[in-house]
Amino acid sequence: MDMASFTADWLHCDQLSNYVARMVSHDRRDPVRHSNLLSSALNELLEMSFRSEADDGDFVCNFYRCQQTERIELIFPCPPEQRQFYKKIVLGLKTGRALINYCNVITNDAASDGQAILLGLVVNYDAEIQIHDLGIGTLAFIVDLPLERLLN
């Protein structure tokens, strides 16, 4: 989808996340619960890409499944300083202090939404997050969500 079309309306985040989550969850053990969890996580990621404030380029969302894990791959245009900011956040996720950092972020009014979103996915969904700078003003987030394991 063209990024300008995606960012034309905030409701696109909710509409896309609900639609995709229903489609992806139809064959899971508890499709309604799985869909709700996936929709919530995906909506957070879509809102983060929505806030990139970039209109030039394409917005791409891919889904993959490997056993109990859903993989979301978001590719979207992102300004250089914001790409560096997201890289720093993702690097900080690997410190093993996600819960402490998440509690600090959600109680700090000055903290960034992107940091809260990514830490929230790690803490609440046991997500594994990778980030790749595609070098053409574009960023790729790869988020693995073990939702079926969470539903056991």
Image (cartoon, rainbow, N blue to C red):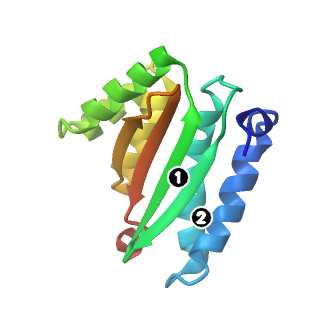
Q: Is 144 located above or below residue 109 in the figure? A: below
Task: Write down the quadrant of residue 26 in the picture.
Answer: bottom right
Q: Which mark is residue 136?
A: none
Q: Which residue: 64% across, 42% down?
A: 59
Report which residue position mark 1 lands on: 41
Judge left or right: residue 98 versus residue 21. Answer: left
Judge left or right: residue 147 versus residue 62. Answer: left
Give the amino acid type for the residue marked by disc 2 in the picture.
Asn
User: Mark 1 packing: few (<14 Cα in 10 Å), some, or many (20+)?
Assistant: many
Out of 52 and 56, give the one closest to the viewer.
56
Out of 7 and 126, give the one closest to the viewer.
7
Residue 103 visible in the current orientation: yes
Task: Give how far across and how far down residue 100 sits, in percent.
Answer: 26, 34
Give the amino acid type for the residue marked by disc 1 in the picture.
Ala
**Residue found at the very far front of the displayed protein:** 136
Task: Give how far across and how far down residue 142 sits, in percent.
Answer: 42, 49
Pick whichever of labels 2 and 1 is earlier in the sequence. 2
Task: Write down the quadrant of residue 32 in the picture.
Answer: bottom right
Report which residue position mark 2 lands on: 36
User: Mark 2 packing: few (<14 Cα in 10 Å), some, or many (20+)?
Assistant: some
Q: Which residue: 27% across, 32% down?
A: 91
Task: Say if mark 2 contacts mark 1, CB within 8 Å.
Answer: no
Q: Which residue: 38% across, 39% down?
A: 131
